[in-house]
Amino acid sequence: RLHMLDADALALRVARTNVPSAKRAFLCAGWPETRSAFARGKPLRYDWIVSNPPVHRGQPDDFSVVTSLIKGARKRLRRDGVLWIVAQEQVPIGRLLAAHASFKWTSAAISPDGRFVTWSAGRGQRPPAGFRKETVQAAGKAHPPPAAAAPAP
């Protein structure tokens, strides 16, 4: 079952065209919290939550959407669920994960051009295949340098 959400109506329309099998689409700027959003009146639990959250809602960068995503993700993930976040390398996802969530593991993989980082964080015992485990342990720790976070060969 696939659910999508976006704060931009046009982006949501394009996403529905690209992924016609999606069961639900929510036009919202964060987690849909209303009882009417879900059949049982509470959020479902997901295997994966995947996001490329906006951070450029004005100047300076605004991390409120990312923070809300991280804070709400853990309770919406299944036991072995994984949160995936793709962001530009300068966005402090590692620090935000450490400050606002308690995942068992966190991993980061930097794109070949060094501009983007794919973060994953999980509730289960092990990271997804193909990623080196880079546990973020302190809220003040930035994400690892590119050499330490490269995908495992």
Image (tube, grey):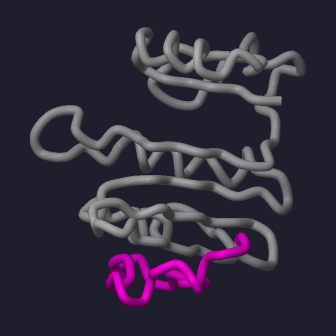
Residue at 58% x, 74% y is 106
**Which of the 4 image quadrants contains residue 93?**
bottom left
| Picture coordinates of residue 43, whole percent (x, y) | 77, 32
Give 4 or 29, whichever is nearer the viewer.
4
- In the displayed structure, 118 sits above or below 13; it is below
- Outermost residue on the bottom side: it is 148
Let me know if residue 145 is in the magenta part. Answer: yes
- In the displayed structure, 63 sits above or below 121; it is above
Residue at 59% x, 20% y is 18
- In the displayed structure, 94 sits above or below 53; it is below
- Outermost residue on the left side: it is 59
Report the number of numbered marks. 0
Q: Is residue 145 left or right of residue 136?
A: left
Residue at 59% x, 13% y is 17
Q: Is residue 116 left or right of residue 94?
A: left
In the rendered image, which quarter contains the C terminus?
A: bottom right
Main secondary structure type of the part rendered in magenta: loop
- In the displayed structure, 25 sits above or below 105; it is above
Q: Is residue 85 left or right of residue 74?
A: left
Residue numbers of the magenta segment:
128-153
| Picture coordinates of residue 108, whole percent (x, y) | 49, 73
Give 72 or 87, whichever is nearer the viewer.
87
Let me know if residue 120 is in the magenta part. Answer: no
| Picture coordinates of residue 50, whole percent (x, y) | 59, 45
Residue at 48% x, 72% y is 109
In the rendered image, which quarter contains the N terminus?
A: top right
| Picture coordinates of residue 59, whole percent (x, y) | 10, 39
